[in-house]
Image: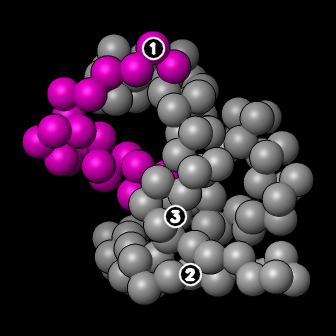
Amino acid sequence: MTFAAWCEEVRAKGEKFISDYAPVREYAKKVGLPEDFVMLAFQVFKDRYTNGEKGKRKTYSDWRAAFLNCIKADWFRLWRVDADGRYSLTSAGLQADLEHRKAA
């Protein structure tokens, strides 16, 4: 199903999109990825699959699993991690943060 159809289904069930999805929380905790970076990634993910011409047509059978893959592979190149395990936003991440903070 498309992301828009999945969002409608999730809302109809009264569920949360990803914040209650344990695999994302567990992975982020395991690697030390800050929660606000996960939420930023979801904003970018949501924007791509809601507003992008190609993204609107994309279908997945499990959008939560797709988002987990997005986090694991850093699809949008939003962050970097140093040798000590500290995360920081890349230029793309800073730009996305500015865009989505102003939109909120």
Distance of label 2 from label 3 (alpha carbons): 10 Å
Residue 79: x %, y % from top left: 57, 73
Question: Which stretch is magenta?
Answer: 42-62
Quadrant for the N terminus in the image: top left
Packing grade of label 2 (10 A; few <14, some 14-19, many >=20) is some
Camera-near label (3 vs 1) is: 1
Q: Which residue is mark 2?
A: 89
Q: Which residue is mark 1?
A: 61
In the image, residue 89 lies in the stretch drawn in magenta: no
Q: Is residue 8 visible?
A: no
SS state under label 1? loop
Distance, label 3 to label 1, CA atoms, is 23 Å
Q: Is residue 30 above or below residue 11?
A: below
Whether residues under marks 2 and 3 lie with C-beta atoms below 8 angstroms apart, the answer is: yes
Amino acid identity at mark 2: Leu
Picture coordinates of residue 101 (x, y %)? 42, 76
Q: Residue furthest left?
A: 53
